[in-house]
Amino acid sequence: MGTLAFVADGRNVILLGPPGVGKTHLAVGLCTAAIRHGESVLFVRAGQLMEDLRKAQALNRLEHRLRYYARPKLLVIDEFGVWPYDRLAANALFGLIAARYERGSVILTANKGFADWGEVLGDPVVASAILDRLLHHSHVLNIKGESYRLREKKKSGLFPSALVGIGEASQEVQQP
C-alpha cells in the first residue's frame, strides 16, 4: 500500500478496528503520500458525508454532490459506524460507492465490523450492496489492540476497570 499502487489500480483500503488503534493516522499517511504523488484526494468524516448527501437528496441535488465526491482519485471516509444513519443517507452512500466503483479508490476507516453494517445503515440489503462493491477490489486491515490515547491512563491507574483488557495487541492483514 505504501507504493500507492492501490490508487493507480482503483482499489480500496478498509481499515477496521476499535477507537484509538491508528486507523485515521494510517489513512492520513496514505493521503499525504497520494498528494505528494500528485493524486487528487478528499478527506471527509462519515457523519459529515452522510449528512451532506442526505441534505442534497432532500434538495434534489444529490447527483451534483455525488459528482463532487466521485471526482477525486482517492476519497477517504473516516469514522464510519460511529453513528447510525437513516435509510436516505444509506441509499445516497450506495449511490456514491457505485459511482466510484472501479473508477476511484476509497479509504474507509470503521469502528464496526462488516456484520454490523446493516444495523448502522438501517438496511442490510443496502449494506450488502455497498460492501459488495467496496470489497471487490480491496485491501482489508483489521487492527486489534488497545487505544493509544488511553494507554497512558491505563498505566497510571486512571483507566476504568470495566475497559481494562479490551483488545489484545495484534494486527491482521487480509487481502482478497
Image (cartoon, grey):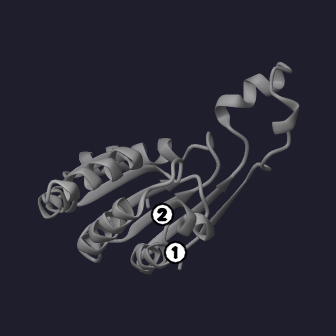
Camera sees residue 4? no
- Location of residue 45 in the rendering, given as x and y in whole percent from the top left corner: 38, 45
Q: Label 2: which residue?
A: 121
- Location of residue 102 in the rendering, given as x and y in whole percent from the top left corner: 28, 77
Kindly give the residue lying farthest to the front in the view shown: 58
- Location of residue 84 in the rendering, given as x and y in whole percent from the top left corner: 51, 53
Q: Label 1: which residue?
A: 124
| 157 relative position to 109: left or right | right
Task: Work out whether 98 lies above or below 78.
Answer: below
What residue lies at 36% left-to-right and 71% top-to-bottom? 11
Mark 2, residues whose alpha carbon is within 10 Å: few (<14), some, or many (≥20)? many
Task: Work out whether 128 lies above or below 166.
Answer: below
- Location of residue 166 in the rendering, given as x and y in whole percent from the top left corner: 80, 45
| 174 relative position to 34: left or right | right
Camera sees residue 6? yes
Figure quadrant of residue 96: bottom left
Label 1: state its secondary structure.
Answer: helix
Label 2: state its secondary structure.
Answer: helix
Q: What is the quadrant of the N terminus in the image?
A: bottom left
What amino acid is at disc 1? Pro
